Structure formats: C-alpha cells, structure tokens
Image (cartoon, grey):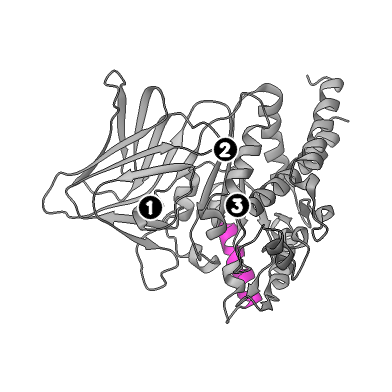
Amino acid sequence: MRSPAFLFTLLVAAHAIGQSNPFSADTKPFMNPAVSRIVFKGDSTAWERYHAKLDQLVFEGDGQIHVAHIGGSHVQADMWSMELRHRMQNMVPGARAGRGFIFPYTMAKSNNPWWYNPEFTGKWTAVRNVMRTDSSALGVAGISVTTHDSLAHLKVSFRGDVYPGYTFDKVRVLHRMDSSYQVFAWSADTTVRIARRVDERAGFTEFTYDRQRDTLQLRIERTDSTQRQFTLRGIVLDSKDPGIVLHALGVNGASTASWLRCQRFSEELAQLHPDLVILSIGINDAHDPDFSAARYEANYRELIRRIRIANPDAAILLTTNTDSYVKRRFVNKNAGAVRDAMLRLSASEGVGVWDALGVMGGEGSIRSWEKAGLAQPDRIHLKRPGYALLGDLLYGALMEAYARHIKLTSR
C-alpha cells in the first residue's frame, strides 16, 4: 500500500518536474508557459487507465509504458521526441526499458535522427505516405524502402550526447512477406545465440538474443531468383526491462491525409502496444492552400478510430500546431482552426489536447523564437534547442496531469 509520505513526496516531485525543468525555468517573455497543461473537454477514462499503469511502474517498478509519437518532420528528426523520451525514461530511476521503433531513413535518402546510425549495403528506393499516387502498402512508419539486390546488409548502432546507448534482447523486423527473401541477425561475438521466428500473418521476422546487445546486424538474402524485391517497413528494438519506451513515427511533409494512406497502420501500431499515442499532425495540413477545417477534423477523427483499433484502451493526446508563417511573411491563420478542431475532438472523442501554439506565445510568436535562436529562418521548423524546449514543456504538462491523478487517488 502507498504510504502518505511517499505519495506526498512523489506529488511534490511531479509538480517540481513540471515547474523547474531547465528550459521552462528560463522562460522567454514571448512564451506563455501558464497554458502548458493537458486539457480534457470530454471523457478522460482512457487517461485514468494510462495513469494507473504508470502507477504500477512508479510504485512497483514493474511493467512497461509504450508511447507512440506520430507526426511530420517535427517527429522524423526525433529532436522533440528525443527530449521527451529522455525525460520520461529518467522519471523512474533504473527503469529505462528500450529504444523501440526505428527506421533507417538514410536508406531512403532522407534525414536520419542523429541518435542512431544506420550503415547499409545495397541499392534502395523509398515510398513515403506523402506520395499521393503511390498505392504501396505502408505501415506505422509511413515510409518503406525496397531493394532488388540479392544480398544486402544493415548495421544500426547508437551515438549522441543524450544517452550512452540502448541495449536490446529482442528485435522485430517489419517487412513484406515473401518466401524468396529471408532476414537473418548475426553478431560479431560468435558466442551470442540468436533464435529466429517468422510471423507471416503479422508481417515480421523476430530475433531473440540470449543476452543484451547494443548493435544490430542484419543480413537480407534472396533465396529464389524468380522473386526480385524486399521491402523493409521498420524495426522494433525491444527489452524485458521495465520502463518507458517512446516510439517516434514521423515523415517529412506528412499530413493527416498522408497517415490515412497507410493501409497497415492499425495492424502495425498494435504491435507497439501503445498506452499513450501523441498526435502532432497538422502543420502540413494548415499550409495546404486548400485547407479545410471540416476535412481536417474528419481526418483526425478517422485516425483516432484507427488508433483504437490498435488499442481500444490507449490514451490519446493531440498537440496543436507550432506557430508558423507562410512564405516567411504571413502568419498562418489556419493554426487557430487546427486548435479549435482539436478541442472539439477532445469533447467528442475523449482525447487530451496540449496547446503548443499557445505555449509558444500565440500567432506570430515564431518570429521571437527565431530571434532567440530557437527556430529556423523558414519560420516553420524549430532548431534543436527549440525542439528540446518543446519536449521539456510537453513533459512538464504530462507530469502535471499525472500529479493531478496522484492527488485524486491518494485521498
């Protein structure tokens, strides 16, 4: 049973995390951190379930929490997501879990998150969910890469200053099922034993290691000359360790319509077992000259439906657009319509909303972020310090919501 002293300590700590993280404490005059909280306009039952599972991790050191962060370029670069991941994984000392979903974007000739380094052989072509005329079956990554080579290799290792690296003892390679190609994992340490299992229905090859590893080595072989392509849709690095796993799922330029083109979205999202899904989709919709608030809201409603197919119990958080300009000269007025749509969805769908636009300082605030070195000159994207600040503020809002839960359940 939770002791009152321990509950009080945790409650104070939770509030402190939200109030004194290094970025929000250094708030700029143009920001509005007072609105940095999760808003619920309707039923919040799913969030109660999420917080109860978080209780199990915090109080008992047991279980894993899986968070999926879905969006466009803000998420593909994994700077916003990385800061949030770093904060959440250090919330419970010693409970770090694993890295979760990754995609080797360099194989698609696109920008890869700095934190992991894919090295590969073979010629690869990419399909992205932003390609309106391509009907290829995409999954939760929103992107895939295909090779026609008879043999290809992929190595993934970790780097960067945010963390020393991740270890894993289970890997799922999501790919097109074709008996003419097989995927094998291997290790430079020949004493490591690796068990292999193929699940054709779910669309993955799974490897289980007899000990923790920090580097992934894959070999992709064609075994039948009559078949000539292999398609990779993503990789999940897993561990038995308790803690929080944050899966970053982003595609540059992706809109709500882009994610609705992913035929295998629900099926593959279910494999990530999401307890919390954060949707940061909207800035590319808002920059469409044919933007329709009604269509945008309908698309989001369908995305929420597909998430609930993957996990009916998942808590869902919508983050409003960051402030942006059109052609660097005009404030994008559609950001307000996006926020209004999300608040209506909160009331009707029982999802939370975090107002990134309001936190930044409202319409036109990105100019101040640019002058402060937090945003790019295009007045759409942020710089790494800006994304880190956004991640810290969102983490603080999540912790403030959890503190409210602790206060209510400890009475």
Residue linked to disc 3: 384
Mark 2 is surrounded, within 10 Å at the Cα level, by few (under 14), some (14 to 19) or many (20 or more) other residues, namely few
In this picture, which residue range is highlighted in magenta?
292-305
- Answer yes or no: do the residues labelled 3 and 1 have beta carbons within 8 Å? no
Q: Is residue 188 above or below residue 314?
A: above
Mark 3 is surrounded, within 10 Å at the Cα level, by few (under 14), some (14 to 19) or many (20 or more) other residues, namely some
Q: Is residue 343 above or below residue 316?
A: below
User: Can see residue 110?
Assistant: yes
Q: Distance from label 2 to label 1 (Cα)?
A: 21 Å
Amino acid, disc 2: Val
Nearest to N terminus: mark 3 or mark 1: 1
User: Can see residue 313?
Assistant: no
Residue linked to disc 2: 162
Query: Which residue ends up furthest to the right in the rendered image?
Result: 411
Residue nearest the observer in this picture, 131 or 307: 131
- Answer yes or no: do the residues labelled 2 and 1 have beta carbons within 8 Å? no
- Position of 162 with respect to 318 (left or right) is left
Q: Which picture quadrant has residue 132?
A: bottom left
Which SS type dominates the magenta stretch? helix
Nearest to N terminus: mark 2 or mark 1: 1
Residue nearest the observer in this picture, 218 or 338: 218
The x, y position of residue 307, in whole percent, is 56, 53
User: SS at mark 2?
Assistant: loop
The x, y position of residue 69, in whole percent, is 57, 50
Q: Which mark is residue 106?
A: 1
The x, y position of residue 211, in whole percent, is 40, 21
Q: Quick check: is 85 in the magenta stretch?
A: no
